[in-house]
Image (cartoon, rainbow, N blue to C red):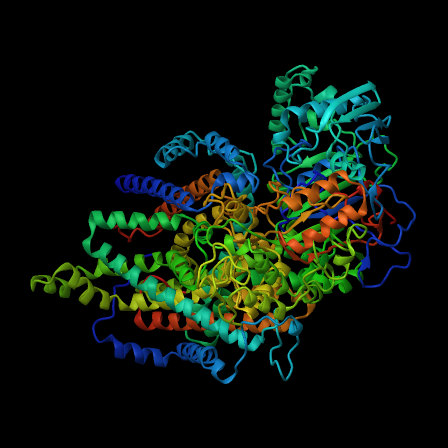
């Protein structure tokens, strides 16, 4: 999607970025939320230990009490502890997917944008092809091929998400490569690879970071959809989406503690990452993707 | 323009072929066989052989692919293994249903997103802008299955105001004749799309409002309302058009989760059932249709975009 | 959701028969036992439409004799309302033959139980022609030439065991069998799979062909069968093809859509006494149970539906909105099937003590109480104790040979040379074939780690398997869970025997996909006998084969008990609790109770609205 804006983010934009960021209240709220949630998920279990492996049916579906602050679920797991555990999975998967898609997308887009013409045309057709295949079809076909493990889910979600960053980076690189500093680097004998890695990518950093942040948010959501469709990870694994989906089976029984806490933390996390990404986007004046 | 169109059409054909190749490769890479999936656990080796022979599954993959392409070009998308009906009939039955559902929700989303985004742009930085931003992000971040089920729980189960299922009628007329049943599914889909549309509109409107000609228009005494309508609205439509073009794919692919929650037999459920039961003809045929719709959709979007904004020059890609 | 229904003796598909316990006065808010209490009568309001929820897979075949590979149990639901079986299973709540709805007026065994004389009732087809013995011989001829392509076929039984069929007059059929069977077994399990088909309308080989005695030659019978099966698969013409309009049951099909929605209207020419009262019966499809429960709770669209067991607490709310709820035990066996010939772990499963240890570690009573809320058969052995109470042996009724006992499981393993690590991984430290060693084919250091493949979509199954995984870990047995949609599962599971276990279809180790239904006489034919059609894991034992055969021929209860106890102890499959069917129906709809576990179709001709 093109607008008339020129690319920005010259060297040394780090300080500018931090300053713009700090001034943006939404960004601070987003960061704050992410920090609190991450602490809850990763530090929480150190303070509040629960058994998330052994099924104890006698303790199933107990309402919140002193002993179980958020009650227990259908297998007898402490729900509060499970939210922490689930958060670890959801956040780990989200961040892993963001990293993988960013790296792959960036390299792919940079190469396509820099080398140009025929290679670019071919690479972009590949992207168009994958964009035209419904994500659900890809997911379903791939999930049935392998036994789902954490690593596999990361790979699957990455396969669906690398297209966006690739296109954006390519767009950036296309406009950057005509700039003076690139000509200069070429004249000084820089090879293609060096130019891509040392000059183009850092200058496209804005786009990359913004896109990566949004990818985290989207992956957490897509993971929850996978859980609902029954394509997620098997027990005793937990992630917010599967917890929410399982809890919804008991919605009418009044077991609100299985539904609303999981929904709240899931939604808050996704909102927080979106706020951060949005603030980064504004701060960098990045063109292209916006929310 | 003509050269551009030719080039784009050529690209579109390449993409469509690419889609067919990728889908074909993926479904044949899967373990388990279509014969077993269709015939069940009691399939004997001879029966499997008969099935494979009847459906040409024992030929080399390239031969199968070529014959699929030839058939598709002639308009024959094959016959479903499990439903025993021509794939084109199945698609013809289900696609309009998604057209209605997703078409209505996209329209609703736009109708809400345009005013909201422009309003936010005009009031940029103020409390109202922040409030709507939080609202947008909030709506965007709700998993759609949760949202749908919650709406059903409130409006259907608690208040008995609306039906819990989407219209079950066979024909478009029948579906549209049951508007009460359309409310919840359309709302579920629309509110999430609205959230992301409004962000595009907002940022596009912000950019437009900063342009010089807006200042000029205002200084000539043109009422703000007209400024907004004549200039800002039109420019804000540009990103929306791109998004609409991409939404062709979503309409044709259906919405698996919304269809599951509201028991609406559309393309999404067709994909899901076909993928889980290795019904190759449906998978190939439907994916082909989606691929074609996507490239046509984005082509139309690009043309509309260039018509609306002749300042945009077309670089390759 | 997805019930893996295999057609044993062809009679059962969906065994969620309606059990209506409408005691006068009714129990408020609780689930009544659908089998007890007689039907209550009320003022009959003629007409009305009943909408039933159809959960999971929809029918896809309308000719009553589907091909061997078609295991869709819902097809029997579709066809039995239009072409009832010769012997109709289930009368009220009793698991006996229903004399009113069966097509015979008398059925007698003579000549040492080798001759069966059947008198047909003077009923008519919907086109006015009488049902005659020629219709029976038509079915017989078709099956004789094509039984290997009939999904209800039991190897060695009908029609192979028939020496001769004679039709002395238009209403009499005489079957001479090659051997004498237990009459209960033969009537209940074999004759209940045979519908009568209209020879005068269907005995042709093409749409434009002439109806004649084509079935009397083998080639002709094959051609007719092939034609009828071809037509029977065309879902788009189910309600329009003239073939399927000739019925002898109380209903005919008025509409059938590709998504599984179909509806019946009464057959005005039905000759039986239970003539339909309502105008229309609609089967409305749901792919998962969430939209079904939502529709029930919102109150407007469904009249009859099943209640998933994880939603059992909804009973209270539903009963205060005009619904009644009744439970019925399902006659079937639910189990985890081990693949005795899997290359990696088959050797482990072939050891009885390992199967025993696995069974000792399944806490069935807790699963019944907590996951199924008490509404499940305890799963003490192959025969359900509630649904087929007359056949359940004292051993089973007392809890079965393997009650939950983790200590016994551990000591069993230790006694056979395993180092048991609770919560960790148990490994074989003493390989060999001696009495206190691990057993043939088991290597040193081999661990007890298995993959359990099960079908997704049912909450209670997910919870049950998670509980099983957790409790097996007490003895260091690791169960890796993998759930897949039923169709995907089926595409990778095949029959694995000592002789043939190809990798492409025998990579599975443990599989659980629902339950296998029983006909009126729940013996193990087809399940635990060598080469049985549902014996996917390859269990083979000459003693078991002998005992099963004895139940087919012998008539005594003690023969049956001997087989049953042996099977319960032998664990060809790992027994699991089997959930009951919970039916929700509008209180003003009468005739739904008493529910019968055995009718594979809902007997909606008995239903009527009171207001």
Nearer-the-camera pick, C574 or A246: C574
- Indicate the position of residue C579 as horizontal and vertical percent values: 70, 57
Can residue B163 be seen in the rendering of this structure? no
Residue at the extreme left of the image, as rendered = A188
**Left or right of C96, for residue C450:** left
- Which residue is rendered at x = 46% and y = 39% of the image? B285
Can residue C75 be seen in the rendering of this structure? yes
Instruction: Give the total number of marks visible in the rendering.
Output: 0
Quadrant where the C terminus of chain A lies? bottom left
- Indicate the position of residue C154 as horizontal and vertical percent values: 67, 36
Quadrant where the N terminus of chain A lies? bottom left
Considering only vertical position in the picture, is A32 above or below A53? below
Nearer-the-camera pick, B286 or C169: C169
**Left or right of C483, for residue B218:** left
- Indicate the position of residue A242 as horizontal and vertical percent values: 54, 64
Considering only vertical position in the picture, is B44 above or below C220? below
Nearer-the-camera pick, A17 or C305: C305
Nearer-the-camera pick, C59 or A199: C59
- Indicate the position of residue B52 as horizontal and vertical percent values: 47, 33
Residue at the extreme front of the image, as rendered = C434
């Amino acid at each position: 999607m093109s607008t008339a804006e020129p690319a920005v983010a010259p060297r040394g934009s780090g300080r500018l970025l931090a300053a713009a960021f700090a001034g943006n209240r939404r960004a601070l709220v987003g960061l704050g939320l992410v920090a609190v949630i991450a602490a809850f998920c990763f530090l929480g279990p150190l303070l509040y230990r629960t058994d998330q492996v052994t099924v104890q049916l006698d303790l199933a579906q107990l309402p919140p009490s002193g002993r179980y602050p958020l009650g227990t679920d259908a297998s007898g797991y402490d729900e509060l502890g499970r939210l922490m555990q689930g958060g670890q999975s959801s956040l780990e998967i989200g961040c892993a997917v963001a990293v993988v898609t960013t790296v792959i997308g960036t390299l792919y887009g940079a190469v396509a944008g820099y080398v140009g013409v025929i290679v670019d045309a071919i690479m972009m057709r590949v992207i168009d092809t994958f964009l035209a295949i419904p994500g659900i079809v890809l997911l379903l076909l791939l999930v049935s091929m392998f036994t789902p493990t954490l690593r596999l889910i990361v790979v699957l979600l990455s396969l669906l998400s690398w297209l966006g960053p690739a296109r954006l980076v390519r767009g950036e690189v296309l406009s950057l490569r005509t700039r003076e500093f690139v000509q200069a680097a070429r004249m000084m004998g820089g090879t293609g690879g060096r130019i891509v890695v040392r000059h183009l990518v850092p200058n496209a950093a804005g786009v990359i970071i913004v896109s990566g942040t949004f990818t985290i948010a989207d992956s957490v959501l897509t993971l929850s959809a996978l859980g609902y469709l029954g394509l997620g990870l098997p027990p005793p694994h937990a992630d917010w989406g599967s917890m929410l989906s399982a809890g919804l089976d008991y919605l009418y029984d009044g077991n609100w503690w299985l539904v609303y806490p999981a929904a709240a933390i899931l939604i808050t996390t996704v909102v927080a990452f979106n706020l951060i990404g949005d603030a980064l986007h504004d701060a960098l004046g990045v063109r292209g993707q916006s929310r | 323009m003509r050269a551009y169109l030719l080039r784009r059409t050529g690209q579109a054909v390449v993409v469509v072929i690419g889609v067919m190749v990728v889908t074909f490769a993926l479904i044949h890479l899967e373990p388990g066989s279509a014969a077993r999936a269709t015939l069940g656990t009691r399939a004997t080796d001879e029966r499997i052989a008969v099935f494979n022979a009847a459906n040409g599954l024992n030929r080399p993959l390239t031969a199968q692919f070529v014959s699929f392409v030839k058939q598709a070009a002639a308009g024959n998308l094959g016959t479903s293994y499990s439903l025993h009906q021509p794939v084109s009939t199945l698609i013809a039955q289900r696609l309009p249903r998604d057209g209605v559902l997703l078409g209505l929700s996209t329209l609703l989303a736009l109708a809400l997103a345009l005013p909201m985004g422009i309003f936010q742009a005009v009031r940029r930085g103020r409390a109202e802008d922040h409030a709507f931003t939080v609202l947008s992000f909030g709506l965007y971040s709700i998993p759609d299955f949760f949202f749908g089920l919650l709406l059903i729980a409130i409006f259907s189960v608690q208040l008995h105001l609306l039906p819990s299922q989407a219209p079950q009628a066979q024909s478009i007329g029948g579906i549209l004749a049951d508007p009460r049943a359309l409310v919840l599914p359309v709302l579920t889909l629309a509110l999430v799309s609205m959230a992301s549309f409004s962000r595009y509109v907002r940022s596009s409107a912000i950019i437009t409002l900063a342009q010089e000609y807006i200042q000029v228009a205002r200084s000539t005494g043109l009422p703000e309302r007209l400024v907004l309508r004549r200039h800002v609205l039109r420019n804000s439509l540009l990103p929306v058009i791109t998004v609409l073009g991409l939404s062709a794919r979503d309409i044709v692919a259906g919405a698996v989760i919304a269809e599951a929650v509201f028991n609406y037999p559309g393309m999404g459920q067709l994909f899901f059932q076909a993928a889980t039961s290795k019904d190759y003809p449906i998978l190939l045929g439907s994916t082909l249709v989606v691929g074609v719709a996507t490239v046509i959709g984005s082509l139309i979007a690009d043309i509309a975009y260039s018509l609306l904004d002749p300042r945009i020059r077309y670089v390759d890609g | 959701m997805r019930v893996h229904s295999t057609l044993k003796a062809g009679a059962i598909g969906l065994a969620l028969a309606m059990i209506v316990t409408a005691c006068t006065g009714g129990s408020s808010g609780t689930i009544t036992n659908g089998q007890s209490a007689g039907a209550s009568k009320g003022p009959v309001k003629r007409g009305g439409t009943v909408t039933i929820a159809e959960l999971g897979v929809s029918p896809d075949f309308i000719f009553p004799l589907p091909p061997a590979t078609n295991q869709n149990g819902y097809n029997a639901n579709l066809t039995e309302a239009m072409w009832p079986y010769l012997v109709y299973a289930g009368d009220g709540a009793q698991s006996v033959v229903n004399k009113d709805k069966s097509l015979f007026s008398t059925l007698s065994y003579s000549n040492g139980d080798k001759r069966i004389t059947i008198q047909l009732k003077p009923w008519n087809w919907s086109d006015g022609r009488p049902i005659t013995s020629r219709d029976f011989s038509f079915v017989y001829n078709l099956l004789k030439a094509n039984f290997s392509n009939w999904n209800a076929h039991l190897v060695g039984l009908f029609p192979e065991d028939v020496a001769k069929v004679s039709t002395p007059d238009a209403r009499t059929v005489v079957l001479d069998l090659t051997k004498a069977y237990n009459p209960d077994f033969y009537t209940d399990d074999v004759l209940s799979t045979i519908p009568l088909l209209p020879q005068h309308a269907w005995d042709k080989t093409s749409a434009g062909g002439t109806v004649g005695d084509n079935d009397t030659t083998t080639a002709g019978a094959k051609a007719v069968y092939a034609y009828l099966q071809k037509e029977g698969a065309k879902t788009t013409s189910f309600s329009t093809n003239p073939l399927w309009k000739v019925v002898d049951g109380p209903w005919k099909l008025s509409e059938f859509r590709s998504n599984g929605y179909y509806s019946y209207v009464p057959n005005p020419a039905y000759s039986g006494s239970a003539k339909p009262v309502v105008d229309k019966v609609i089967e409305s499809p749901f792919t998962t149970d969430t939209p079904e429960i939502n529709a029930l709770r919102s109150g407007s669209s469904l009249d009859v539906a099943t209640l998933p067991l994880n939603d059992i607490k909804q009973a209270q709310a539903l009963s205060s909105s005009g619904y009644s709820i009744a439970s019925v035990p399902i006659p079937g066996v639910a189990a985890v099937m081990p693949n005795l010939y899997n290359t990696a772990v088959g050797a482990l499963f072939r050891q009885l003590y390992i199967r025993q240890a696995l069974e000792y570690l399944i806490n069935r009573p807790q699963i019944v109480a907590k996951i199924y809320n008490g509404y499940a058969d305890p799963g003490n052995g192959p025969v359900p104790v509630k649904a087929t109470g007359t056949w359940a042996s004292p051993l089973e009724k007392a809890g079965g040979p393997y009650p939950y006992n983790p200590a016994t499981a551990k000591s069993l393993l230790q006694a056979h040379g395993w180092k048991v690590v609770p919560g960790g991984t148990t490994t074989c430290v003493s390989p060999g074939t001696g009495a206190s060693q691990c057993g043939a084919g088991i290597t040193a250091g081999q661990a007890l780690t298995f993959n359990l493949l099960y079908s997704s979509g049912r909450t209670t199954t997910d919870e049950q398997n998670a509980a099983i995984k957790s409790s097996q870990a007490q003895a260091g047995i690791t169960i890796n869970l993998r759930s897949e949609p039923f169709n995907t599962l089926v595409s990778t599971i095949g029959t694995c025997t000592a002789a043939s276990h190809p990798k492409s279809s025998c990579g599975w180790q443990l599989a659980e996909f629902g339950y296998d239904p029983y006909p009126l006489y729940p013996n193990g034919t087809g399940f635990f006998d060598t080469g049985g059609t549902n014996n996917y894991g390859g269990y083979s034992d000459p003693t078991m084969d002998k005992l099963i055969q004895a139940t087919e021929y012998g008539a005594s209860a003690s023969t049956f008990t001997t087989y049953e106890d042996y099977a319960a102890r032998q664990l060809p499959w790992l027994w699991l609790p089997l959930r009951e069917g919970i039916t929700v129906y509008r209180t003003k709809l009468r005739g739904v109770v008493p529910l019968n576990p055995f009718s594979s179709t809902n007997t909606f001709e008995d239903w009527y609205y009171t207001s």
